[in-house]
Image (cartoon, rainbow, N blue to C red):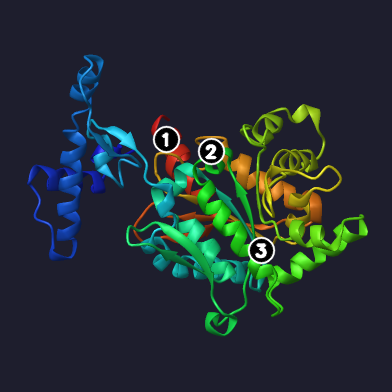
């Protein structure tokens, strides 16, 4: 079997880097990028910076992220992410219209209809790499437009009038990881407030419809109309303040303790039922699970992958959160949602079914690796 270094792509890269190849005009720009990134990765200064740090010297700051997409992240610098007040960036919002359309089209091809309610799994590390691309898709689905100040900081979220939107609003549920909750609370507060306002719009949008349905159930349980409306508009959920993880990953490996994946779904909606919105910040109701109520009519769930360092099998977090969402929706509704990955590892993003993404990863990382050892 051909080893990686003797494959045609590797030989081409080697020729470009060593100056032995003459790239055609079609790939000349790409060849220049390959050369620049190779030099950056090969001469990164990490060892010198480590020795300097151990000697107590100053280490200059530099941006972090995936070293393939951002070679400067391996340049011997003291890494930082970026300012959370700038999420989403204007570039991410501009590109998100096409990315949301890809998700809608993928769901239409699979189910034959437009998704009515989408569950988004938001991760802090992913957001730092895609600058709020998934958050921007949330805004597009709801029909919200960001307003930034001159420094690129998010000031507010404006509701796009229905007649200007040109399509129906799509309802959402946000599952935020604990680290995301800690780092991007400013965006969460603005988003939760905007969703509350959309739920009050008189036109019969999906957010208002679903909020009324949940409010009716709460009123039947004895809540006042005012409290029911306030709680029914909550769409952002995470752990309790100071709590981290869902526990689904640990429960999954203890399969001898349960007979149905309802146990996983119940674990997910119980641990992550704390509401962030509706006048609450990390609170739950003792007699009703608002997160479960909002998951009942979810038909699609999505997360992002922005780095080739990790796939969906290299850590337990993808199945913990996207898989946890799927189990939770099945537990509360009896129906399995469509699962998608917003693949942002390259400049041209794509939306692909989670099953296909998993198959591609198995083939590229594990089966080929196994085959090379036979």
Closer to the chain start, of discs 3 and 2, is 2
Question: Neighbour class for label 2 at 10 Å: few (<14), some, many (≥20)?
Answer: some
Drawn side of residue 50 relative to residue 271, left or right: left
Which residue lies under the disc numbered 2?
A: 179
In the rendered view, tell whether residue 99 sits above or below residue 249.
below
Which residue is tagged 1? 369
Residue mark closest to the camera, 3 vs 2: 3
Q: Residue furthest bottom?
A: 163
Q: CA distance from mark 2 to mark 1?
A: 33 Å
Q: Along the polypeptide, which appears first: circle 2 or circle 1?
A: 2
Is the residue 296 above or below the residue 15 in the image? below
Secondary structure at badge 3 equals helix
Tell me residue 173's x, y (percent).
65, 57
From the viewer's side, name the closer residue of 85 and 34.
85
Please give the residue where the numbered disc 3 appears in the rendered image.
196
Tell me which residue sits at (35%, 42%) in the image. Answer: 66
Question: What distance separates the C-alpha of mark 3 from that of mark 2?
Answer: 24 Å
Residue at 20 percent across and 44 percent down: it is 37
Residue 245 position by quadrant: top right
Distance between mark 1 and mark 3 Cα atoms: 50 Å
Residue 269 vertical position relative to residue 257 in the rendered view, above or below: below
Percent of width and height locating residue 310: 44, 39
Query: Does residue 354 show up?
Result: no
Q: Position of residue 54 (x, y in %)?
A: 25, 15
């Amino acid at each position: 079997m051909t080893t990686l270094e003797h494959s045609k792509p590797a030989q081409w890269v080697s020729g470009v880097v060593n100056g032995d190849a003459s790239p055609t005009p079609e790939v000349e720009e790409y060849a220049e990028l390959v050369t620049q990134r190779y030099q950056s990765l090969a001469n990164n200064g990490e060892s010198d910076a480590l020795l300097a740090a151990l000697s107590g010297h100053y280490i200059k700051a530099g941006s972090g992220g995936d070293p393939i997409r951002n070679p400067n992240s391996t340049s011997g610098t003291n890494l930082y992410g970026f300012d959370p007040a700038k999420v989403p960036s204007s570039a991410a919002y501009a590109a998100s219209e096409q990315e949301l359309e890809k998700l809608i089209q993928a769901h239409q091809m699979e189910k034959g209809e437009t998704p009515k309610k989408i569950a988004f799994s938001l991760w802090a590390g992913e957001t730092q790499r895609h600058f709020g691309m998934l958050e921007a898709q949330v805004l597009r689905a709801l029909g919200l437009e960001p307003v930034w100040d001159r420094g690129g900081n998010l000031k507010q979220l404006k509701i796009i009038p229905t007649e200007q939107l040109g399509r129906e609003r799509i309802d959402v549920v946000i599952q935020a990881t604990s680290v995301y909750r800690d780092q991007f609370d400013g965006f969460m507060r603005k988003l939760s407030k905007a969703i509350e306002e959309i739920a009050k719009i008189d036109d019969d949008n999906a957010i208002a419809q679903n909020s009324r349905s949940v409010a009716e159930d709460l009123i039947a349980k004895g809540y006042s109309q005012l409290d029911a409306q306030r709680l029914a508009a909550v769409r952002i959920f995470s752990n309790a303040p100071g709590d981290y993880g869902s526990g689904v990953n640990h429960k999954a490996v203890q399969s001898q303790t349960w007979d149905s994946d309802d146990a996983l779904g119940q674990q997910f909606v119980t641990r992550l039922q704390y509401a962030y919105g509706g006048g609450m910040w990390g609170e739950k109701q003792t007699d009703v699970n608002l997160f479960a109520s909002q998951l009942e009519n979810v038909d699609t769930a999505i997360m992002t992958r922005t780095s080739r360092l990790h796939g969906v099998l290299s850590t337990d977090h993808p199945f913990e959160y996207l898989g946890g969402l799927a189990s939770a929706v099945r537990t509360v509704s009896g129906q399995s949602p469509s699962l998608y990955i917003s693949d942002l590892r390259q400049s041209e993003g794509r939306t692909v079914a989670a099953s296909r993404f998993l198959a591609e990863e198995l083939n590229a990382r594990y089966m080929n690796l196994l085959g090379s050892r036979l």
